Image (cartoon, grey):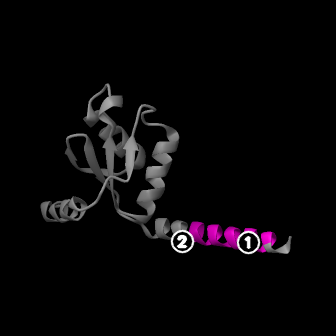
Amino acid sequence: MDKAELKNLKKQANGLKPMFQLGKAGITGTFIELIDKYLKVHEIVKIKVLIATTTGDIQFYADEITKETKSILLEKKGYTFTVFRKITKQNRKDAYWAKQDKLEEKNQNNFDDSED
């Protein structure tokens, strides 16, 4: 990734609010899974580390999350950091079909409720 691309991505991330908060539970499998799912649909995510619950270095958390989600650390400011992962065609397909499955399940539940 060249400097111009990196600068453009940082510019895009500037207006975003943190979507996830890393709390006292730390980095769990569920937390990584949620970030991974989010990155399948959105390329950029901001993560805020709660001040009161941290005992370690923020860089450690950022490195661990980027390693587990196969993403790139765009920037780190204070207790917030931003990661990026390019969306692949397969990720888009997976996200689309997961959404379709949820809609189908919801419609089925509504249909079942109306039969009562």
Q: CA distance from mark 2 to mark 1?
A: 21 Å
Quarter of the picture containing the N terminus is bottom left
Residue ID for mark 2: 96
Q: Residue at x 54, y 66 (%)?
A: 94
Q: Residues within 10 Å of mark 1 (few under 14, many from 20)?
A: few
Q: Which residue is mark 1?
A: 110
Q: Position of residue 52 (x, y in %)?
A: 32, 30
Q: Amino acid at mark 2?
A: Tyr
Q: Position of residue 60 (x, y in %)?
A: 30, 33
Q: Is residue 55 above or below residue 32?
A: above
Residue sitting at 50 percent across and 48 percent down? 33
Q: Is residue 115 left or right of residue 46?
A: right
Q: How far across and down, in percent of the image, does residue 25 sit?
A: 46, 32
- The part of the image, by quadrant, that contains residue 61 is top left
The magenta stretch spans residue 103:
yes
Quarter of the view holding residue 64? top left
Residue 23 within the magenta-colored segment of the rendering: no
The first of marks 2 and 1 along the sequence is 2
Which secondary structure type mostly characterizes the magenta part of the structure? Answer: helix
Give the extent of the magenta segment: 97-113
Q: SS at mark 1?
A: helix
Q: Position of residue 58 (x, y in %)?
A: 27, 35
Foreground residue among 113 and 104: 113
Which residue is at a point 34% across and 45% down the rendered structure image? 66
Amino acid found under the numbered disc labelled 1: Asn
